[in-house]
Amino acid sequence: MWGLALALLCLPLGEGTLRIPLRRGRSIWEVMREKGLPEGFLNNLRGDPGRKYQLSGAVAYEPLMNYLDTFYFGEVSIGTPPQNFLVIFDTGSSNLWVPSTYCQSPACEDHTRFNHSLSSTFLGIDVTYTLRYGFGDLSVVLGYDTVTIQNIVIRNQEFGLSLYEPSRPFYYLDFDGILGMAYPGVAISGFNTLMQNMLQQNQLSEPIFSFYFSRNPTYSYGGEVILGGVDPQLYSGEVLWAPVVQELYWKISIEEFSIGYSVTSWCSQGCHGIVDTGTFLLTIPGQFMAALLQALGAEESDYGFLVDCSSVPNMPTLYFAISGAWLSLPPTVYVLENDGICTVGVESTYVPSASGQPLWILGNLFLRQYYSIFDMANNRVGFALAT
Ligand SMILES: *[C@@H]1O[C@H](CO)[C@@H](O)[C@H](O)[C@H]1NC(C)=O
């Protein structure tokens, strides 16, 4: 029932179609430079990514819960004293919002709502916005307050307090709100994103964050988002780095795609892939969907793209060429099993690529196989085999 909504989750509709005004955001690099970091600091960062930096600030290990093997969400607090919310840590959008007591719709009443009257640090501003996501829209009014994630405290953070949330899909979701971690260029214009403030307020020991999604998630432990660092116990081997090609989403180049040993040439003119923790499935450019399903022997049905569970071990591994290396996605990762029904966890990409390259979205399905590191200083994404 939620197949489509799940795939569409959290990535705002097509670049440039957002209703919120788009602004070409300054890179965090520029922001950091403006802040007057010590001479050579950024060069060191660029030249020697592996070293530890003598920044103040912390590393926060935020556990993620998992719902039906689809959503991964964690807890954040807003206000003084803190009010707690379950949010998706979404690299495919850039705003933070939570339900609020301004909102009377059933979707809000069914979730934890932020009551601004109870927070001594809240500052309201009379600005409303409509936030658009792949699965639906909601309207918010903006305010500022303290946001706490584990040991990290961000003061005067702009966030959205929902005014109205349509029942579909919000009533049915197990999380309350969304915490966007993409670039400022897709955020509401004129306000710092949470990640910008985390850096400016010196809350992170390194200007990175990373994700681990468990391959055998339970409701109580689905994985982790690590703010300000990585957890080497959660991956093995080398980190492969891919530069961000456009600083709006965490968008990288995909140089080639192969089904087993058969190279498709689908990306011979270049493909782009958005690394998105707010999309569940792997989404592939619509024009290649039929060919992929045929190659995998999958059939379209009400449940999704069905395959015979007994044939999964014989299905081909998918390979993505990224930064000159092949990243593999074996059938045990891209086929989802639910009550004896096996489906291929792919969907058509619903956003056109602004620059014309076929667009993929590397969602949670891909990110369960690869621990991902988002490097805000060097504008690159790292992948390493998840443990
Ligand atoms: C919000 O808190 C105020 C102050 O305690 C209270 O009067 C009000 O009823 C609360 N609103 C809701 C909707 O719970």
Image: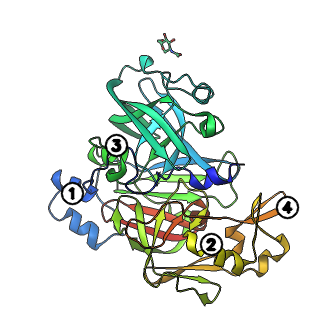
Residue depicted at 72% across the width and 71% down the height: 332
Mark closer to the chain start, 4 or 2 = 2
Residue depicted at 59% across the width and 58% down the height: 213
List the residue tagged with mark 2.
289
Secondary structure of the residue carrying tag 4 is: loop
Q: Is residue 219 visible?
A: yes
Nearest to the eye among marks 1 and 4: give it: 4
Mark closer to the chain start, 4 or 3 = 3
Nearest to the eye among marks 1 and 2: give it: 2
Mark closer to the chain start, 3 or 1 = 1
Amino acid type of disc 4? Gly
Give the distance between the C-alpha atoms of the residues marked 4 and 2, in whole angstroms. Answer: 24 Å
Mark closer to the chain start, 1 or 4 = 1
Q: Would you call the spot at circle 4 few (<14 residues within 10 Å), some (14-19), or many (20 or more)?
A: few
Q: Can you tell which quarter of the image residue 95 is in?
A: top left
Residue depicted at 75% across the width and 73% down the height: 298
Where is residue 378? Give x, y as percent: 31, 65
Q: Is residue 151 visible?
A: no
